[in-house]
Amino acid sequence: MISLSGWAGRAATVAGVAGASAAIDLVAKAVAEAWLEEGAVRGALPFIDLSLSFNHGISFSLFPAHDQSSLALLLAIQGTLTCLVAGWALAAGGGLERLGLAAIAGGAAGNFVDRLMDGVVTDYLDLHTGGIRWFTFNLADVWISAGVVLLLLDGLPLRRGHRSAGGPIP
């Protein structure tokens, strides 16, 4: 077994997590596009349905890109931010921080590739409760949200105390 340490280990972790996240997201989007009809709703769980939609903008359809120049600008911003987060993940000091940033980078990369290929981001998971529909999203959004949770957990005072003291907290 090959053991990677230092920069090579960090790069392998970031590439593995981000690559797997993006790949799983893109496969799920392809399956959703093949299996679902746009606008039709298929029940999946009591709180989530499958409903194919296409997002021309960023989160919650903000700043939609309907022409080539706005799409190019959106892709440039999205690609730049994805690379910055991946670089931040490589430089991260701790494993939990690195894992969270790699998950965010992978989700962002999945949405970037989807937008690059189709001009839109494919969404298909429709969250709802008690007759209220919240929003439609995809696995890339799940990876991004999970990454944010990991970053929040990494920033908890208990964890910071553990790192700064150099040993376990009594």
Image (spheres, grey):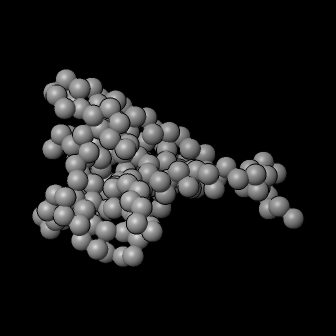
User: Residue 52 location, x and y as percent?
Assistant: 22, 59
Quarter of the rendering occupied by the N terminus: bottom left
| Furthest residue in direction top, as rendered | 69
Q: Is residue 30 above or below residue 70?
A: below
User: Residue 66 location, x and y as percent?
Assistant: 19, 32
Q: Is residue 57 left or right of residue 3?
A: left
Q: Is residue 28 left or right of residue 67?
A: right
Q: Residue at x 30, y 50 (%)?
A: 110
Q: Is residue 37 left or right of residue 85?
A: left
User: Residue 157 location, x and y as percent?
Assistant: 76, 51
- Image quarter of residue 131: bottom left
Q: Is residue 88 left or right of residue 93?
A: left
31 or 170, nearer to the observer? 31
| Furthest residue in direction front, as rendered | 131
- Image quarter of residue 13: bottom left
Q: Is residue 9 visible?
A: no
Quarter of the rendering occupied by the C terminus: bottom right
Report how many numbered discs are placed on residues in the image: 0
Q: Is residue 126 visible?
A: yes
User: Residue 92 location, x and y as percent?
Assistant: 56, 44
Q: Is residue 98 above or below residue 70?
A: below
22 or 124, nearer to the observer? 124
